[in-house]
Image (cartoon, rainbow, N blue to C red):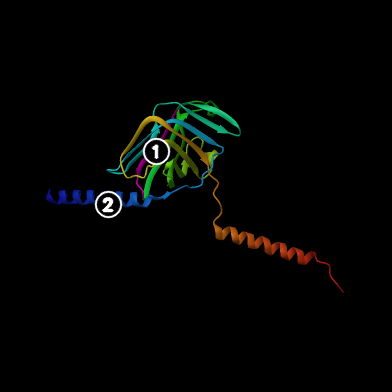
Amino acid sequence: MKFRGLVSAAMSVGFALSMAVSSQVNAVPVTAGSLGLISGEPDIQSNFLNFEYTGAGDAFTIESAFLGGGQFTNGGLSENIIDSSFLISGTANATDAALNLTISGELASLGGGLQTLLAGDLIGMANSGTGVMEFLFGNLTGALSSFYGSQAGVIFTDGALAGFNFSQDTSLTGFSGMSDTISVNVPLPGSLALSILGISLLSVSRRRKLDAPVCH
């Protein structure tokens, strides 16, 4: 019995350590400023959002105050999302964050029925301190994920968050927040872009030499 107790305790400690390591691996740095996201289409617009941050445990939540208030816009056409809900939750502080995104609702253009429209894992975050936060999510799933490609950006705005810097508990339940969840085009890494440019220039140079008139 004593041996079983020791094994059980060891397994519990191992599980706790693995969870701690997992949370550290999943956490991404929080940038002071902006990620440079620009509103565009496709866009899931979510309104009437509440914000909650608790320093003890770094609990972080942005969520719909009630079902509704969502709209999907793509190709210049907009459609209301029935019973829409928006949720970003997990842990965050001034240094790093580990958050998930889930947007659910019902779209007639998708055949109706309540379903997850877009979900993903945090891969980037910025807090401007002016009432605007930006998030970048990858590993996208959901009925609208094919419209977004590999990454989705969320621009969250609430004027009541001006000055927020994770230094104190904050609860904004006046559903004054709003967000735009947009597609993000991922630029080529600098070195790869330069390599492609170099190859292109070399190709042009060779073509010019081949096309040049031959003097006898």
**Percent from the top left, x then y, of residue 143?**
50, 35
Confirm whether the magenta stretch covers residue 124: no
Confirm whether the magenta stretch covers residue 85: yes
Q: Is residue 16 above or below residue 77?
A: below
Which element is circle 2 on? helix
User: Would residue 152 be found to the left or right of residue 95 on screen?
Assistant: right
Q: Amino acid at mark 1?
A: Leu
Q: Is residue 96 above or below residue 42?
A: below
User: Would residue 116 be found to the left or right of residue 17 on screen?
Assistant: right
**Percent from the top left, x then y, of residue 117?**
48, 34
Give the residue number, with chain letter if any, for mark 2: 17
The quarter of the displayed image where residue 102 is located:
top left
Question: Upstream in the sequence, badge 1 or badge 2?
Answer: 2
Residue at 53% across, 36% down: 43
Could you give the CA–CA distance between mark 1 and mark 2, rounded to whole angstroms? 35 Å
The quarter of the displayed image where residue 47 is located:
top left
Give the residue number, with chain letter if any, for mark 1: 161
Q: Are marks 1 and 2 in contact (CB under 8 Å)?
A: no
User: Would residue 45 be found to the left or right of residue 93 on screen?
Assistant: right
Q: Is residue 110 above or below residue 123?
A: above
Q: Which mark is residue 55?
A: none
Of the two numbered discs 1 and 2 in the rendering, the one whose residue sits closer to the viewer: 1
Residue at 76% across, 64% down: 208
Number of other residues with Cα within 10 Å of mark 2, as a class: few under 14, some 14 to 19, many 20 or more: few
Q: Amino acid at mark 2?
A: Leu
**Percent from the top left, x then y, of residue 160?**
40, 35
Q: Nearer the viewer, residue 209 or 17?
A: 209
Which element is circle 1 on? strand
- By secondary structure, the bulk of the magenta-drawn segment is best described as strand
Residue at 32% across, 52% down: 21
Residue range of the region highlighted in magenta in the rendering: 84-94
**Percent from the top left, x then y, of residue 174?**
38, 29
